[in-house]
Amino acid sequence: MAIVSVDERIVFVGLARVTDGALLASIFVDSKIASQEKQQFERQFLQSCQQQRGITNAEFKTRVILEYPCQGNMFVMAGNGVSSHCLYAIGIRDAGYPERLAYACLNEVLERVHVTQGDSLHHLSSLSLTKPLKKPVREIIKRYQLADRDKTFDAGKSRRVEGEHAGQCAENFRNTSQPGEFGAEDRQHEQAGGPVSEA
């Protein structure tokens, strides 16, 4: 089994619609992660979405044991409010990472999505949020990598700080997340066998 770097325990965050199975965002902490591993994270997340397809249950949460070539756990939870028709996922290589912190991290991601995307989640195309959310989500992940080893870490305080940053950046994200807009990296991802927008 590969040695897990403490700086790379949280490696993946995903956002998908359960209404049509569209993967709206697929964000990895490091772009150098092997494509096989990336595809496995996405595949297992989309399997969870398929099981919940057409169902909106605000209480839904589940832990998925990652399969080879990945290791660790993926935590999946339902959105609420404007993203009640979506699922959020976080992939963590370290099987000992606390569940409560995994969901706290996902809640910060959810808040960022709500502030920057609002009602647009219903009509955005596949992977259209990967580019605009990549930087802020990576910043959120960075704060949670060692949160379980930091006795002074306060998830509530972290969310308040993140909320302030989100408010300042909301307009920038709206301007860079037009439906159907893809960067070169996104196009390469789709050509390499990435997920399609319709299941």
Image (spheres, grey):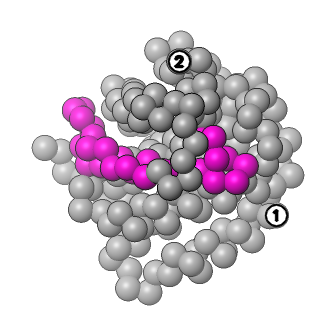
Residue 5 spot, x, y in % from top left: 28, 56
Judge whether 186 appears above or below 56 on screen: above
Q: Secondary structure at mark 1?
A: helix
Reply yes or no: does residue 38 show up in magenta: no
Report the Cα–Cα distance between label 1 and label 2: 35 Å
Among the two numbered marks 1 and 2 on one chain, the one whose residue lies closer to the N terminus: 1
Based on the displayed image, in which of its 4 quarters is residue 197 positioned? Answer: top right
Residue 110 spot, x, y in % from top left: 62, 55
Residue 199, label in figure: 2
Q: Which residue is mark 1?
A: 168
Q: Residue furthest bottom?
A: 152
- Dots 1 and 2: beta carbons under 8 Å? no
Q: Residues within 10 Å of mark 1 (few under 14, many from 20)?
A: few
* Residue type pointed to by label 2: Ala
Based on the displayed image, in which of its 4 quarters is residue 140 positioned? Answer: bottom right
Q: Residue at x 37, y 59 (%)?
A: 7
Q: Nearer the viewer, residue 29 or 88?
A: 88
From the image, state whether disc 1 or disc 2 is nearer to you.
Answer: 2
